[in-house]
Image (cartoon, rainbow, N blue to C red):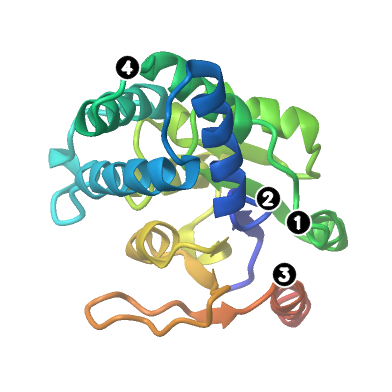
Amino acid sequence: MAVKAILFDLYNTLVRNEARQWVQTFEEICRLQGIPLDPAQMWARWQAVEVEERRRRVNLAQPDASPPYKTYRVTWTLCFERVFAEVGVQGNPAEAADLCIRAMGCREAFPEAMPLLQSLRGRVRLGILSNADVDFFYPLLARQVFPVDIALCSEEARAYKPHPRPFQVALAWLGLTPREVLFVGDSLEEDIQGAKRVGLRTLWLNWAKAEVPQGLLPPDAQAYSLADVAAYCALEVLCRL
């Protein structure tokens, strides 16, 4: 069946979301709130707490039994509350979370991202599907005007990838079947597992050239750079015309 649309993850796929950027945000948090901690160490502790929250938010065995949807703003505020309490500092969790949200709305695109999308524009429908809040998803898309047909974030779908709902909503917006859509993402757990379970074709942007752990569904193909993604997508489109 022909590929009629390609959906892309956003963060760490089309735009940068690197440790150095997070540390810069935590430097600002520490400076503005007078927190006497090393920003990199505080970010590492906060990240560990945030990862715990991510693991609890989707029940893959029974998606309908997943916890109620909770925005990043709410989750990140709770993470800051926990970290501040653990390290014994007086900080403002809500303001810290707000700084993170504003930073996420200002991320820069990878240099290869726009040429990749422009090379596919008009040959296949394009979309973005991101685990993101409206508060930073749309400010980022206003800054980085990607040539896509649809853009959908987890807050609009009221579920996070790998929950099937975001993928199902995107398919409904496109009016296509799963096998007509290729999903490209950097997260094996959130992007590839979620897309595979719904039946989409998958391309894993495997920046680190990691192995697929036992027990996880393998992607249909792998890429190790955005240049690889461009080559694969062009071949998929050309071969299926």
Disc 1 crowd rating (10 Å Cα; few below 14, some 14-19, many 20+) is some
* Nearest to N terminus: mark 4 or mark 3: 4
Q: Is residue 202 visible?
A: yes
Residue 34 image point, x, y percent: 48, 19
Give residue 226's mark.
3
Q: Position of residue 3 (x, y in %)?
A: 63, 67
Query: What residue is disc 4 on?
Result: 90
Viewed as shown, does residue 135 lie left or right of 74? right
Q: Is residue 204 above or below residue 178?
A: below
- Per the model, the C-alpha gap separating discs 2 and 4 is 33 Å
The secondary structure type at the circle numbered 4 is loop
Label 2 neighbour load within 10 Å: few <14, some 14-19, many 20+: many
Q: Which three-letter amino acid code belongs to the residue tagged 3?
A: Leu
Q: Earlier in the sequence, mark 3 or mark 2?
A: 2
Amino acid at dot 1 = Phe
Q: Position of residue 139 (x, y in %)?
A: 68, 25
Q: Identify which residue is drawn at 50% across, 27% down.
A: 30
Circle 2 SS class: loop
- Read off the residue under disc 1: 110
Q: Say whether marks 1 and 3 touch (CB < 8 Å).
A: yes
